[in-house]
Image (cartoon, rainbow, N blue to C red):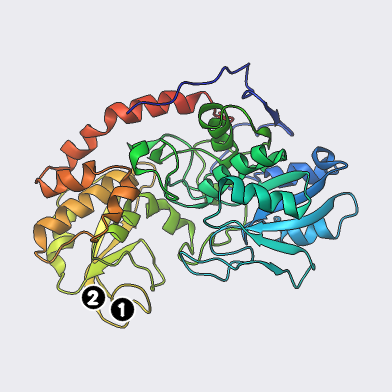
Amino acid sequence: MTLPRRTLLTGALTTGATTTALGTSAPARAAAPTQTRTGFDHLTTTAYTDLTNQKVGLVTNPTGVTRDVRHFVDVMHADPRVHLVAVFGPEHGFRGTAQAGGSQGRYDDPATGLPVYDTYTKSGRALADIFGASGVDTVVFDIQDVGARFYTYIWTLYDCMEAAALAGKRFVVLDRPNPVTGRAAYGPVLDPAFASFVGRVPISQAHGMTAAELARLFNAEFLGGKVRLTTVRMSGWRRSDFFDRTGLPWVPPSPNMPTPDSALVYSGTCLFEGTNLSEGRGTTRSFELLGAEGLDGRWAAALDALALPGVRFREAYFAPTFSKFAGKTVGGVQLHVHERRLFDPVRTGIAALVTAKRVWAGFAWRPDHWVDKLTGSALVRTMIDAGASTDDIVAAWQPGLRAFRALRAEHLLYD
């Protein structure tokens, strides 16, 4: 993999960017939940000084909430210290009513009267024109990510940054935790030939970064430092913190991400979207339940025999209410992560694919090779088809992953 040449960095700042480091990091803590303060928390404690005399538009969804679960669009609209004039909704919509692959379109928000513009699938000059028509001076981004390359909100971030630069608008990112920690990056790095809305630029499948860190990386490495970027940091969050350590409320970032447990496995088991097996959509345990008609206990037994770190597999039967196998009872497995600090979701997802193909004659890839978009190249699919082991497949992506980890380290904001 060839990474683009890096633009010059000066100290801790990306070229053409500023970082607002408000508050102080929490000291070493016991095992009890902490009180992480988000970027929005710090923005309000400074009386919105980063937005003074600016007409503001917010890119957000239902996760943009305060600690007492008020949506910050409602909070800011009611506050005379900030001039909020527009909202921009991503996939699933601003208020979150649309399923996967859908959005809410253009409408006026009934609660505030603010115009809501649809960003989903829009990019480049088309999105820049929307920013221009909205009348905003500054675009603010605040959405809870889940740490996987193919979760589309980080590409909404990327597209909005690029469009803001084209439209001459300032861009502010209010940071939130990576719910599955920021300890490390895992999995294959995207081959640019496979770029899509589930992966615009070469980052790893589980990136281990926050939205503000990704924004810094995007601006410096892929957008030429052209974005007038400000990142408002969190305090009280460490890279080793899972979401339940933050003290923040969990709001499902999308309809099939109901809990932090879903997010924990998602960067591996979402690969089953690229097969004829159910990835658990239409159940209460999306991405934790996997299965298909004709599968039985042999798959769970084969997976358990691998003794993968931190996870066990239970033979499971379920009937999705929508998506694949809607209304039918299918067999498969449920993942039970018992030691999440040892758990590698991407390696686990590959092992599940390898064993499913081995124990079930009905296994098939989606005809459009969607799994190539998810994994970032044809490598995983072709190696599995050739009979490669999980170890061989994981080894094949290590050179690209090492290069990305070195690049990633330059843009991290937290210890």
- Asked if marks 2 and 1 touch (Cβ < 8 Å), the reply is yes
Furthest residue toward bottom:
327
Residue 187 seen in this snapshot: no
Residue 326's place in the image compared with 174, above or below, is: below
Q: On the rendered image, what quadrant is the C terminus found in?
A: top right
Q: Residue at x 57, y 45 (%)?
A: 124
SS state under label 1:
loop
Most foreground residue, 304 or 19: 19
Tell me the kind of residue under disc 2: Val
Q: Residue under label 1, please give it.
A: 319
Q: Where, by quadrant of the figure, is residue 64 drawn?
A: bottom right
Please tell me which of labels 2 and 1 falls first in the chain.
1
How many dots with numbers? 2
Residue 43 disc label:
none
> Residue 407, position in %: x, y?
45, 25
Most foreground residue, 125 or 30: 125
Residue 162 seen in this snapshot: yes
SS state under label 2:
strand
> Residue 126, position in %: x, y?
60, 51
Most foreground residue, 153 or 164: 164
